[in-house]
Image: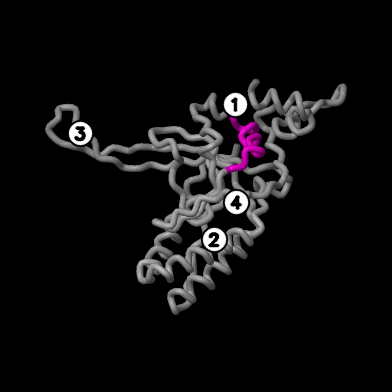
Amino acid sequence: MQLADFVKDTNPETYAALTNETTQAEGATQVPRSTQRPMPIAANVLDTSNFIFNTKVMTLMFPLPQSAATITVPIRDRGQKAGFKLKPIHDLKFTIVGYPTGRILSTIAKKMSDHQFDSFVWQIEQLIRQTNWNWQVAADKAGNAQYWELSRAYLEEVNSPDGKGKYTRENRRGSIIALIDLPGLEGFYCELEKLVSKAANKSTTLPRPATYITLMVKGANQDGIGISSPDELETYKVKRW
């Protein structure tokens, strides 16, 4: 059974909200599906016993809970028709600390003794566990969930057809994302900055990540297009879904 069918059979109200298949009163005007917006998905909480903290590059991610698999329902069918591929549920992750911030943490960590580093990692893990990681798909003022298509061009060197050299070509990647509200993120970063500033013996400001999750992809790279900041996210937005 497909996920949409399962949700439709077991919880019709949730299915209707997610797919905008609302029952119309007799004689009422039905809004065309192409102009409808996905309704918001209920809030969830990330599991603090199940996070991915890579201490080599100092990045932090949370896997999407299995219970939140319906996040893909509003855009899945249209996305596939547009040539996007749905990412497997086990590949859907929230990036809390990305590479830009991870590089700052790594630079500081390299100056620590083994004991200092272990203590530093332990303090960060405690902070992760103490943070309230409530989340939900971000909604606009009208209460509609925000799904966006992103597109980004990368330049890559490839061998020329005659095999006598190389040339540069454009490799365009696309993705469909859900913007995410994480109310506890700012508090987490404020506390993390205190830990980092103490470890570095100087005031340190950490860049905040763009809060989204990649659901569908298009192009050679199946991870997404690589967004490291809210400004980049705005730059590569193509259209609202």
Q: Are marks 4 and 2 in contact (CB under 8 Å)?
A: no
| Badge 2 element | helix
The quarter of the displayed image where residue 74 is located: top right
Provide residue 40's location: percent of width, then percent of height. 71, 42
The amino acid at mark 3 is Asn
Can you see residue 158? yes
Provide residue 185's location: percent of width, then percent of height. 60, 59
Q: At 58% from the left edge and 27% from the top edge, which residue is drawn? A: 78
Q: Which residue is mark 3?
A: 159
Categorize mark 2 by other alpha carbons within 10 Å: few (<14), some (14-19), many (20+).
some
Query: Is the C terminus in the top left, top right, bottom left or bottom right quadrant?
Result: top right
Q: Which residue is mark 4?
A: 49
The alpha-carbon separation of the residues under discs 4 and 2 comes to: 10 Å
Q: Residue furthest right?
A: 26
Provide residue 52's location: percent of width, then percent of height. 51, 50
Answer with left or right where residue 33 lies relative to residue 172.
Answer: right
Categorize mark 3 by other alpha carbons within 10 Å: few (<14), some (14-19), many (20+).
few
Q: Which residues are magenta?
A: 64-78
Provide residue 6's location: percent of width, then percent of height. 70, 25
Q: Residue furthest top?
A: 1
Q: Residue furthest left?
A: 164
> Is 179 or 91 nearer to us in this picture?
91
Q: Which sits earlier in the primary sequence, circle 2 or circle 3?
A: 2
Q: Which residue is mark 1?
A: 77
Q: Main secondary structure of the magenta part?
A: helix
Residue 108 on the magenta span: no
| Badge 1 element | helix
Q: Which residue is mark 2?
A: 125
